[in-house]
Image (tube, helix red, strand yellow):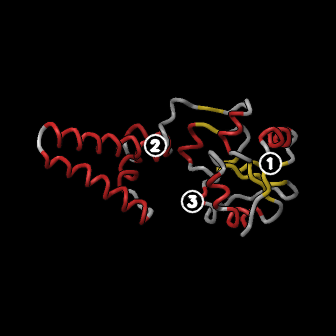
C-alpha cells in the first residue's frame, strides 16, 4: 500500500509562502467554495483522472482534504497523479485552522451538498417519527423511505437527494 509522507501545517505554510510546493485541495468544488487555504489548487478527487491539470515540475505536491482521511484513503491514486514526491497535509484543513493559520472563507457560499443531505434526511426522518406518533402510524413510512434512500446511496454511490439539492436555487451559484 502506498502512503504519502505527512507534513505539518506550519511546514506547509512556510513552503507555500516560499513557493516550493503546490498545495492541491482534493475536496469537491462546493466544499472548496465555502472555505479553502489561500494558494491551494482545487482538484476534486472525483475528477482527478479526467482533470487537465499540469503540476509544476520540480515542485513537491501536497494533497489535502478536510481532515486527512480522504487523502490517506486515496494515497495510491494521488501519488500516481503527482508523478514524483507527494505529501499529505497532516490533519487537513481542520489541523490548518487549529494551528491558527489563515483560510479564505465565504460564509455566503451554500453549505456543502453532503451536509445539506444530512440536514434534509435528518429532518425528514424526525418528521416521519413525530407524525407517526402524533397523527397516524403510517407516517413512519416517510422515515423508512429516507432510510432506504440513504442505504441505496451508500451502496451504489448515487444519491438522488444530493442530485435534487444540487439544482436548488440556493446551490446554483456554486455550480457556476
Question: Helix, strand or loop at disc 3?
Answer: helix
Q: Between marks 3 and 1, how big is the CA–CA gap?
A: 24 Å
Name the residue nearer the viewer: 83 or 147: 147
Q: Between marks 2 and 1, how big is the CA–CA gap?
A: 28 Å
First-in-chain label (2 vs 3): 3
Q: Badge 3 is on which residue? A: 46
Residue under the image location 67 percent in, 57 percent down: 72
| Residue 17 place in picture, x, y as percent | 84, 38
Locate residue 71: give its quadrant.
Answer: bottom right
Residue under the image location 35 percent in, 43 percent down: 122
Seen in the picture, residue 48 relative to 131 is either above or below; the reply is: below
Question: Helix, strand or loop at disc 2?
Answer: helix
Crowding around mark 1 (Cα neighbors within 10 Å: few <14, some 14 to 19, many 20+) is some
Q: Disc 2 vs disc 1: Cβ atoms closer than 8 Å?
A: no
Q: Is residue 41 left or right of residue 60?
A: left
Nearer the observer, disc 2 or disc 3? Answer: 2
Crowding around mark 2 (Cα neighbors within 10 Å: few <14, some 14 to 19, many 20+) is few
First-in-chain label (2 vs 1): 1
First-in-chain label (3 vs 1): 1
Q: Count the marks: how many?
A: 3
Q: Badge 2 is on which residue? A: 115
Q: Is residue 145 left or right of residue 17?
A: left
Locate residue 93: give its quadrant.
Answer: top right
Q: Badge 1 is on which residue? A: 7
Name the residue nearer the viewer: 68 or 62: 68
Q: Is residue 22 left or right of residue 18?
A: left
Crowding around mark 3 (Cα neighbors within 10 Å: few <14, some 14 to 19, many 20+) is few
Q: Disc 2 vs disc 3: Cβ atoms closer than 8 Å?
A: no
Amino acid at each position: 500500500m502506498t502512503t504519502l509522507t505527512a507534513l505539518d501545517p506550519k511546514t506547509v505554510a512556510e513552503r507555500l509562502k516560499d513557493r516550493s510546493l503546490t498545495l492541491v485541495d482534493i475536496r469537491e468544488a462546493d466544499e472548496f467554495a465555502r472555505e479553502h487555504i489561500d494558494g491551494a489548487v482545487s482538484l476534486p478527487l472525483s475528477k482527478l483522472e479526467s482533470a487537465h491539470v499540469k503540476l509544476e515540475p520540480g515542485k513537491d505536491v501536497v494533497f489535502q482534504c478536510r481532515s486527512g482521511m480522504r487523502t490517506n484513503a486515496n494515497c495510491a491514486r494521488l501519488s500516481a497523479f503527482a508523478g514524483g514526491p507527494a505529501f499529505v497535509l497532516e490533519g487537513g484543513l481542520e489541523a490548518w485552522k487549529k494551528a491558527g493559520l489563515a483560510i479564505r472563507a465565504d460564509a455566503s457560499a451554500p453549505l456543502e451538498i453532503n451536509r445539506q443531505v444530512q440536514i434534509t434526511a435528518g429532518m425528514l426522518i424526525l418528521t416521519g417519527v413525530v407524525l407517526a406518533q402524533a397523527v397516524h402510524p403510517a407516517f413512519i413510512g416517510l422515515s423508512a423511505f429516507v432510510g432506504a434512500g440513504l442505504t441505496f446511496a451508500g451502496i451504489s454511490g448515487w444519491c438522488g437527494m444530493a442530485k435534487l439539492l444540487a439544482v436548488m436555487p440556493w446551490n446554483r451559484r456554486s455550480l457556476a
